[in-house]
Image: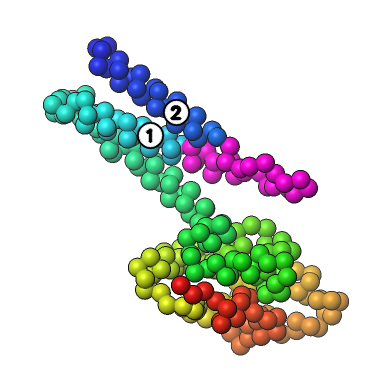
Amino acid sequence: MTLREGGLARLGALLLLLALSASSVALAGGAQPGVFEAPEDIVLVWATRAGLVLMTLSTTLTLFILLTRRQRLMELQSKWILFFGLCVFPIPVTLLSAGVGMEESKQVAFCASCHQPMGPFVEDMRAPGSEDLAAVHYKNWLIQRDHCWTCHSDYGIAGTTRAKLLGLNHIARVTLGAWEPPIQLSSPYRWTICLGCHSNSARFKAPRGDASAHDGVVEAVSSGQTGCTDCHGLAHPPREERSAR
């Protein structure tokens, strides 16, 4: 092994160790007394770490060739190193990043941070005194996690795809200044999403012990004749309290 090749090996090993060390830092802070925190998604954690390591390797190999072997780009060794740096490692990085991004974008924190106009919606949902439907579901833990995503994505792969595309459209419109307050639904809300959780629950079948309270509701909601807010009030703040620039 030549001196230059030995330097490459040592540099690559050092950067790999740095990437592994950075990825092993705990992401979550200490738990609050008396508050249970669900375990981390180990697959998501290691997918993030693997993407970081592979991205570091890809960048290291590419920069090494461009900075130290610029005059030897046509040599076979340089071509192979560039091939791995530019073609091989970026593929799993892209796939891992897409998967991690898909999961992270379901969190309430993502909606609150990326969709700036959504501030009043998130604040109302978290407000202890709010009686809007989103707040009732949130503070009573009726939805275990990913509260915004659960109520705003429809069934199956098609529902997931549509929700993601709409989310990208929202981000683009806000970023480009094409959005005007207040926030409005682009299409009528599909109340059948609510039925996915509620229709078979005991509280829905006999609310407050009245087994006839929801007679015909499933059929009426499924056919589009009525919606949950016709009886239960608003899901979010009223129009006049919604976001402004």
Front label number (1 vs 2): 2
Q: Mark 1 or 2 closer to N-term?
A: 2
- The residue at the point 49 percent across, 75 percent down is 244
Q: State the image coordinates of residue 161 (x, y, percent, origin top left).
A: 46, 63
Q: State the image coordinates of residue 53 (x, y, percent, origin top left).
A: 42, 34
Q: Are marks 1 and 2 in contact (CB under 8 Å)?
A: yes
Q: Which residue is mark 1?
A: 56
Q: Which residue is mark 2?
A: 18
Q: Quadrant of residue 13?
A: top left
Label the magenta part by its dominant secondary structure. Answer: loop
Left or right relative to 9: residue 20? right
Q: Nearer the viewer, residue 102 or 8?
A: 8
Q: Residue furthest front?
A: 245
Relative to 25, is 173 above or below?
below
CA–CA distance in space, label 1 to label 2? 9 Å
Q: State the image coordinates of residue 168 (x, y, percent, origin top left).
A: 41, 64
